[in-house]
Amino acid sequence: METKMEPPKNTIGIIGWLRKNLFNGWFNSLLTIIFLWIVFTVLYAALKWVFVTADWTVIVVNLRLLLVGQYPQDQIFRVWLALTLVSTLTGLSWGLWKGTIGNLAIALGASFLILSLFPFSGEVKTWLLVNATAIGLGYVLGRYFPILRKPTAASWILLFPFIIVLLRGLGTSWLPIVGTNLWGGLMLTFLLAIVAIVFSFPLGVLLALGRTSKLPLVRYLSIGYIELIRGVPLITILFMAQLMLPLFLPEGVTLDRVLRAMAGLTLFSAAYLAENVRSGLQSIPRGQYEAAQALGLSNFKTTFLIVLPQALRAVIPILVGQFIALFKDTSLVSIVGILDFLGIGRSIVAQPEFLGRQREILIFAAAIYFVFSYAMSYASRRLEKSLGVGER
Amino acid sequence: MRTVVPFWRDNRIVPILVQLFFLVLVILLGGFFYNNLQVGLDKTGMKLGFSFLNQSAGFSIKETSIQYSPADSYGRALLVGFTNTIKVAFWGIILATILGVFVGIGRLSSNWLVRNVAAVYVEIIRNTPLLVQLYIWYFALFMQLPKIQDSIILPGSIHLSNRGLALPWLVSTSGTRIWLAFFLVGIVAGFLIYKKQTEKQLITGIDRYPALWAMGALLLSLLFAWLITMDKPFLLTVPTVDGLRYSGGYRLSPEFATILLGLVVYTGAFIAEIVRAGIQAVSKGQTEAAKALGLGHSLSLRLVILPQALRVIIPSMTSQYLNLAKNSSLAIAVGYPDFFSVSGTTLNQTGRAVEIITLVMVAYLSISLLTSLLMNIFNKRMRLVER
């Protein structure tokens, strides 16, 4: 006769899970108890502080400053417009390519909708809803018009210069110039990181090619630059950009603080980018060079048509990682007196009426940095998987 | 018939031309900058040069590891800052390594809670800027601690207040040096005896108790030390509150404690990820083989997994150490007088931007080069283990 035996009661269900994962052996049980105590103490203190002790009015009152700095109030629609463009393109990409970008688009749209429930002014609410709608409309468009693929990709590339022009203005009556000295807050943090990565890209690629070049002079100069920049802290480069750069420029040419910081970040980022690209260049098998030579391609064509495209594809996830690092590193510009997200937060708590509200501002800043960095690194991990890097 | 190759297609000449062009470009660019600099300096009537380093600094430094007074020169002040940087970097590297290894192993623990607490720690720390973390440690933690009169006293007589941290510490006595010398002799002798006895044991197969012999040698040498000095090796001092400051024990200023804690917690998270990746890079068969040989969890980790993981870990660890040393320059944000912060003060007082920034870059470059040199030597030694 066949008898079906149940597994022992203490190896299945919740109790089984607990025994297996938390209480296998005296050592693990001890660890579990100690860690439970730690987790409860920390969580209790943190939750109590967030919901009882902390006074969040400092954030609410200064939200606009924290987000866009001293950008003129009557020109604020430009920032919203720029954001709406990003939303539209995100929505379009979601409809066209699905996958990771879809998750991000949903997260973005959901945050707009949730934020619109907060008691903001009518204008802000409208813009938030416009953004959420833009994502939805973009999705629908992308879904039913796959022909939009190429225009969308091109728009992503054109978006950056367009946003810069939009934010800075053309000097016309309805788009007056808003100088970079008025840019600030989270917007500036993003712009600093984007400008640095975009401008350091060509520089970094050239440096990487220089470092792998067979010409000794080019190679040593590239190595010299890369190792010099990588050997010193970012803050010294930012100080150099603020204090030394003006000395090196001809008379009459002046850059304001923000542009100088952008220059410093670009020079810094280029060295790191060069090393990342170099790792990609080294991953290209010799056969590719030899095949290109056999086809009669010149050195120039081999590099730009055969090697670089493959190398850059291999390093995309690393470049995203570098962008995240740069996004966090831009906080250092607050030390040289620029009012980026952290800088403006620090200047708010320096005002007498918000004295002693450092904790709220700092924790809020940390949370915002965390949300964006985490979202980007999540996307980068997914991207890595979908590109199949390391699997081919 | 021989075709004549024009020189712009000649494979021997083109590279030279390209390099010449490149060189001219770099020289022109450099000359342009240099010329602008000269014009600017001429206007202000300043001359490049390092003679200002001999002038009296005139500012005081809160924390000094070597003798310093405001009457000393700028050069001396910068040296004080440099020693402070070295101090932070040295302790930071050691403590971050310890923290990182524990958290990295914790990330792979079989205990669900430990695993996830470690993961949350790593994610939070890695996704927020170091500068924000430093501000939080300083303004939200150390500055919010009670006044020195109501210091928090943790078990082990560790005092915590907004004046900093004070720990019980050892003070040397008259015999400390002799004790230390004999201790070193004992360690070396013990090590040699241990090796010799193990060798004999391996050859003869008879138990020679190497560990016991080594311990004996060490104890014997310590006994000699006691007979000679007739004194204790160290005295333990416990910190006490003395008016508005601590006396006795080892005292850390809140600034030093902040920058050290901040760097250790931040770099520790990155090291943890490296350690985790290193352990995971060791093939599973190794763990299983160790288990099959009857090694326990900790023994197999210590004897089989970690030595192999170390080879993967060391190169990435080097770059983390370099990052820590460079990040120590953020001490300026909390007011710890490290090299960068002292340089900043000097720059403000003398206005010599070019010289000081050059000096700072050279100093950090040499720290970086020295660290990578040491780590490369270590790396080579570890690689010898490879078959």
Image (cartoon, rainbow, N blue to C red):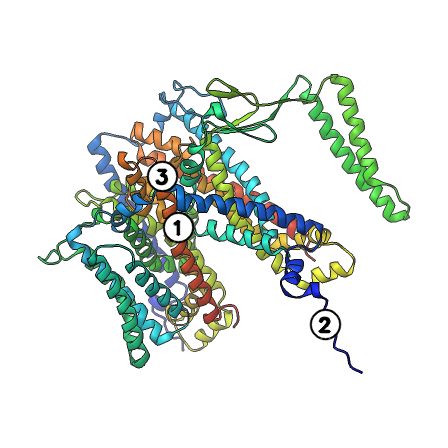
The chain containing the residue under callout 1 comes to A
- The residue lying at 80 percent from left, 83 percent from top is A1
Q: Closer to the N terminus: mark 1 or mark 2?
A: 2
Instruction: Examine the rendered structure and indicate whether residue A18 appears above or below residue B4.
Output: above
Q: Residues within 10 Å of mark 2 (few under 14, many from 20)?
A: few
Q: Chain of mark 2?
A: A
Give me the C-alpha separation between circle 3 and circle 2. 59 Å
Q: Of the two numbered discs 1 and 3 on the same chain, state the one appearing first in sequence.
A: 3
**Which type of secondary structure does the marked residue at label 1 adopt?**
helix
Instruction: Please state which amino acid type lies under the numbered disc 3.
Output: Gln
- In which quadrant of the rendered image does the C terminus of chain B lie? bottom right
Q: Are marks 1 and 3 on the same chain?
A: yes
User: Given the image, on which type of amino acid does mark 1 rest?
Assistant: Ala
Q: Is residue A99 left or right of residue A338?
A: right
* Residue A352: percent from left, percent from top: 27, 34
Checking the image for residue A358, the label placed there is: 3
Furthest-left residue in this view: A173
Residue B273: in sight, yes or no?
A: no
Mark 3 or 2, which is nearer the eye?
A: 2
Residue pointed to by mark 1? A367
Mark 1 vs mark 2: same chain?
Answer: yes
> Can residue A318 be seen at all in this image of the molecule?
yes
Mark 1 and mark 3: span between their CA atoms?
14 Å
Residue A278 placement (x, y as % from top left): 45, 60
Please name which of the two marks, 1 or 2, marks the residue nearer to the observer: 2
Residue highlighted by disc 2:
A6
Q: CA distance from mark 1 to mark 2?
A: 48 Å
